[in-house]
Image (cartoon, rainbow, N blue to C red):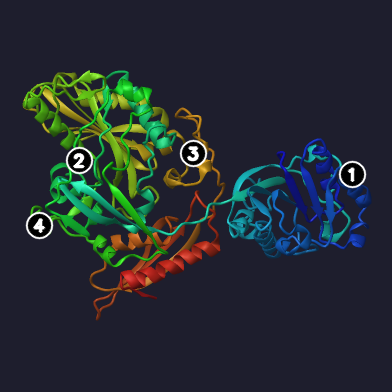
């Protein structure tokens, strides 16, 4: 137990533990309040109780009787007080009460103690070995036979943040009592102390209205609600200590040892046209894209196209801590209408899943949230080519040197790698390693064919990433970086051939989010998007790759619910997964099809899915998961017109 300003101890028997704590903190400014459930006369019957109570009072502490730990908020003596620590040692309902009654005791205690707990306070619960039902118990009991302490705390929005042995040697005068409601001790060998802290509350999805310039046109559109938390987070901003940024810096530094690397500071819109998608993202399945219908399109707008206008030397960028590309376009305007899971009337247009079999120049031009920054890399290279071919006296400075050569399809050769990075979006089904949004690092350069640049960069990346479980797999046109269990984490491939056949254009595409999970041993990619300050605090000293992340939420429970419904002939499963993400606040980890049945007479199909709720970012109780599930049923009925069974 670390020093704190105020400590509340509940459920005391003979007050021997409180007396030890009082003596332990006697020379500090810590205040001790010891309480018990019994009447004063009954409490004094415990052996040594009178002496221990006097020790507490002599140390400046207070002793309260008839305090029910299940109703701390109702205790008159505790009104308007908050404590930095609330301690409950070896709770038990008494006599031969079973695990269910003791679980209920824990649940009511947790719900009660948060009413007197400081915002950054801790709850300490000591349990005998095996009672907690966590992997820290040795041996671990079966779940149904344990007290499920982490699950009971989650009902009060508390996270299990630490588990360590109960240090009985620090409190040598402590004599536990209460075995079968008798003045008799019980075994505390291998007992465990469980530490709980508050979880951040869940926040509802919100509609973001975005205005930006795309190919010279000012456009407005809504961000799909399930993506609202992935927008404008600024993980790659200058000075960021986010692990995604740390991984990008690590990769750039590693590649710069063998090649010249330059990152542009230019910003680009989130939106692409269907024409851009077709031309530059051939490897992206268009059904995995978020198609967008515009709210407003100003064809006569004089808005500026996003082009590479301001590039700074890499040496200057590094000195200012600015080797990144900001997530949000500088000319993007964002407004948000916060809602409690309700979309505006125009939001229905966001659910389009049109094919590309249209005229991209026509009236119904489709737009898509960028699934890659590759089209914007091509735009950057085209601008460079135009500047060079025009013979302009203006030069674009990248990485501390003037642009004397050219890239892409130009006759000259730029031996450096040009890089951009930013957040991208994929409309994928909900599964353990399917990321609807991640940060892509893209590097492009032109090199002599005889130097075998694909092999060279593959080997360089292999040297950097093999220690973290990344391996190279040869595929047509290049190499793929693979890691278990997530699969592909990047590619090295040849781009369009240059006019000079003796040279080859090479592109490196890396998923920074999955690499951050690997390099820092983060248990869940969703933690990267956590708003909890404890997450970034782990990276405040800019740890090197290989230093494992220490989760602030231990042993979160997996909670499963099934959902069954009838659908009509226009059922689209991707919309189903989008609604799941929105309704569950991203807490659904897996969706598994259990059963399907097509009605022989009606154009309807019945589906049964099993949803697994699990998160490391918030406290997730059975009650909260059930609320999410009920809300999902409601949204499916209203949005997708299914009939819940």
Query: Helix or strand or loop: what does disc 4 sit on?
Result: loop
Query: Helix or strand or loop: what does disc 1 sit on?
Result: helix
Q: Earlier in the sequence, mark 2 or mark 1?
A: 1
Q: Is residue 273 left or right of residue 544?
A: left
User: CA gap, disc 2 to disc 4?
Assistant: 25 Å
Percent across and percent down for residue 209 are 30, 56
Residue denoted by label 4: 358
Residue denoted by label 2: 306
User: CA gap, disc 3 to disc 1?
Assistant: 43 Å
Residue drawn at the location 64% of the way across and 55% of the way down? 149
Q: Earlier in the sequence, mark 2 or mark 3?
A: 2
Q: Vertically, is 278 above or below 400? A: below
* Quarter in which the N terminus is drawn: top right
Residue denoted by label 3: 536
Closer-to-camera residue (206/407):
206
Numbered disc in front, either 3 or 4? 3
Q: Earlier in the sequence, mark 3 or mark 4?
A: 4
């Amino acid at each position: 137990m670390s020093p704190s300003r105020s400590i509340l101890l509940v459920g005391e028997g003979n007050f021997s533990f409180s007396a030890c704590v009082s003596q332990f903190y006697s020379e500090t400014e810590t205040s001790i309040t010891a309480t018990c459930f019994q009447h004063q006369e009954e409490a004094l019957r415990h052996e040594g109780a009178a002496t221990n109570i006097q020790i507490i009072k002599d140390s400046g502490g207070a002793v309260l009787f008839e305090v029910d730990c299940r109703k701390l908020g109702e205790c008159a003596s505790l009104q308007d007080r908050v404590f930095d620590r609330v301690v409950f040692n070896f709770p038990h309902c008494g006599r031969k009460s079973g695990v269910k009654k003791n679980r209920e005791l824990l649940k009511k205690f947790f719900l009660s103690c948060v009413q007197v707990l400081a915002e950054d306070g801790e709850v300490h619960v000591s349990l005998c070995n095996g009672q907690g039902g966590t992997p820290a118990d040795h041996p671990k009991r079966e779940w149904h036979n344990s007290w499920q302490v982490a699950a009971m705390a989650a009902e009060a929005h508390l996270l299990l943040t630490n588990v360590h042995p109960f240090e009985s040697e620090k409190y040598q005068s402590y004599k536990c009592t209460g075995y079968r409601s008798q003045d008799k001790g019980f075994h505390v060998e291998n007992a465990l102390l469980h530490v709980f802290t508050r979880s951040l509350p869940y926040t509802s999805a919100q509609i973001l209205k975005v205005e930006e310039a795309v190919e010279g046109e000012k456009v407005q559109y809504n961000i799909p609600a399930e993506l609202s938390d992935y927008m404008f987070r600024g993980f790659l901003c200058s000075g960021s200590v986010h692990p995604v940024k740390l991984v990008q810096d690590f990769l750039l530094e590693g590649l710069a040892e063998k090649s010249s690397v330059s990152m542009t500071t230019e910003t680009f819109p989130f939106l692409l046209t269907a024409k851009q998608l077709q031309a530059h993202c051939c490897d992206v399945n268009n059904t995995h894209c978020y198609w967008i219908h515009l709210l407003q399109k100003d064809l006569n707008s004089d808005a500026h196209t996003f082009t590479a206008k301001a590039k700074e030397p890499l040496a200057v960028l590094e000195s200012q801590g600015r080797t990144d590309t900001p997530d949000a376009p500088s000319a993007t305007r964002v407004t948000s209408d916060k809602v409690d899971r309700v979309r505006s009337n125009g939001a229905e247009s966001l659910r389009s899943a049109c094919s590309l079999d249209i005229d991209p120049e026509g009236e119904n031009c489709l737009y898509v949230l960028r699934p890659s920054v590759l089209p914007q890399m091509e735009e950057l290279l085209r601008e460079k080519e135009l500047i060079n071919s025009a013979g302009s006296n203006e030069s674009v400075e990248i990485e501390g040197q003037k642009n004397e050569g050219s890239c892409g399809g130009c006759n000259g050769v730029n031996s450096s790698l040009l890089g951009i990075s930013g957040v991208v979006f994929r409309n994928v089904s909900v599964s353990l390693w399917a990321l609807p949004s991640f940060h892509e690092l893209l590097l492009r350069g032109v090199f002599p064919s005889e130097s075998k640049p694909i092999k060279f960069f593959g080997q360089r990346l292999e040297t950097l990433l093999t220690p973290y479980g990344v391996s190279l797999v040869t595929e047509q046109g290049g190499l793929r970086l693979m890691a278990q269990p997530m699969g592909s984490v990047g590619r090295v491939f040849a781009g369009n051939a240059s006019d000079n056949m003796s040279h080859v254009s090479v592109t490196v595409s890396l998923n920074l989010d999955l690499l951050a999970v690997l390099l820092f041993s983060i248990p869940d990619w969703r933690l990267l998007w956590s708003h909890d300050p404890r997450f970034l605090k782990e990276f405040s000293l800019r740890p090197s790759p290989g230093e494992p992340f220490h989760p602030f939420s231990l042993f979160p429970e997996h909670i499963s619910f099934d959902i069954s419904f009838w659908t009509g002939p226009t059922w689209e499963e991707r919309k189903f997964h989008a609604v799941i993400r929105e309704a569950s606040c991203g807490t659904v980890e897996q969706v598994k099809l259990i059963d399907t049945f097509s009605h022989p007479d009606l154009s309807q199909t019945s589906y049964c899915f099993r949803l697994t709720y699990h998160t490391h970012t918030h406290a997730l109780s059975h009650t909260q998961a059930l609320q999410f599930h009920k809300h999902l049923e409601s949204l499916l009925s209203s949005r997708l017109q299914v009939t819940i069974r």
